Amino acid sequence: MKHELSILIPVFNTVCVQLVSNIRQQALDAGITFEVIVADDGSTDPQTIEANQAINAMEHCRYICRQPNAGRAAIRNFLARKAQYPRLLFIDSHMSVISPRYLQGYLDAEGEVVYGGYIVGQGDASSLRYRYEKDCEPQHRATERRKRPYQHFHTCNFAVSRDVMLAYPFDERFRRYGYEDVLFGKRLKQGGISITHIENPLGFNTFEPNQQFLRKTEEALTTLHDFRDDLRGYSQMLTLTEGIHIGFVKLLIRLWHCLAGPMERRNLCGRHPNLTIFKLYKIGYYLSIKN
């Protein structure tokens, strides 16, 4: 069973031919029975779609184009249903293989759900995403993740049995960016399914422009607000904001965001983004979302 593996890669406007080639070669070297399925979730860039067609020329690999965009939860459920082998390995398309023993790390691992983590690559100090990821990097170590195994789970790099994935699919109400992985972790805990954390990282090297990352952050905060009843206890932002019990304090934070938010935004989209300002901006933005 361990030597039959479906490697599943959801993609949107990203060329992932090199990632597929690298992971395919490791599977061939390991001598396992495998398939690689790349599912395109409504990409809008024709050149990216054309480039990814090269995946279909690789033995054991498929590139499936889907329209319209179904969302991060639905595309992963689709991949799980398409998979033919009992063990699934999900990899995000913007990640990179950094270890020649990456695949072997999952073949050796025990557990129904196994998360390998990621390492932040080289970036520029002017990148808000890079600075944010580097600041969070100590939390990505397996020793730290094991302290709160269900809260420190991400979809970028994990193995799961197909039976578990079909029994606990991602919640397809999550159409916007963010938090579908958090609710997945919560449902695994409710179902008594353990998550094994190992040190088997992929590389994270894609740092979008500051304005784009800030828009994604705002989208994720809106998702968090919409699903706050489902995610309570699994989000530091929820714990922080719901811990403010004095209405006047919340009103002051909203007022500050209204007045200072545009100034904070200019800093975060500029050449010298400040992480403290980023944290303040997120709190103000979340508390300013209309109920």
Image: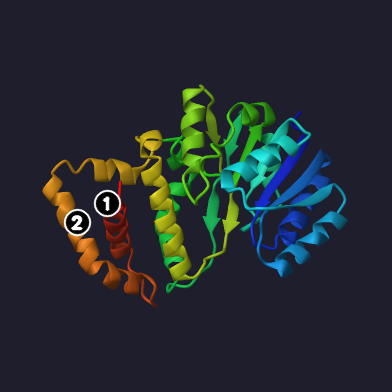
> In screen coordinates, is 53 left or right of 98?
right
> In screen coordinates, is 261 left or right of 7?
left
Q: Amino acid at mark 1?
A: Leu
In the rendered image, residue 139, in percent from the top left (x then y), is placed at: 42, 48
Q: Which residue is mark 1?
A: 287
In the rendered image, residue 108, in percent from the top left (x then y), is placed at: 68, 35
Q: Amino acid at mark 2?
A: Ile
Q: Which residue is mark 2?
A: 253
Q: Residue at x 30, y 50 (%)?
A: 290
Q: Residue at x 42, y 47 (%)?
A: 223
> In screen coordinates, is 97 left or right of 119?
right
**Would residue 133 be visible to someone looking at this image?**
no
Q: Earlier in the sequence, mark 1 or mark 2?
A: 2
> In screen coordinates, is 3 left or right of 71?
right
The picture quadrant where one finds residue 246 is top left
Q: Residue at x 27, y 66 (%)?
A: 261
Residues tagged 1 and 2 counted as in contact (Cβ below 8 A): yes
Badge 1: how crowded within 10 Å, few (<14), some, or many (20+)? some
| Vertical position of residue 264 compared to residue 164: above or below | below
Q: Residue at x 63, y 31 (%)?
A: 165
Q: Nearer the viewer, residue 183 or 86?
A: 183
What is the secondary structure assignment of the residue under circle 2?
A: helix
**Would residue 186 be visible to someone looking at this image?**
yes
Q: Nearer the viewer, residue 54 or 139?
A: 54
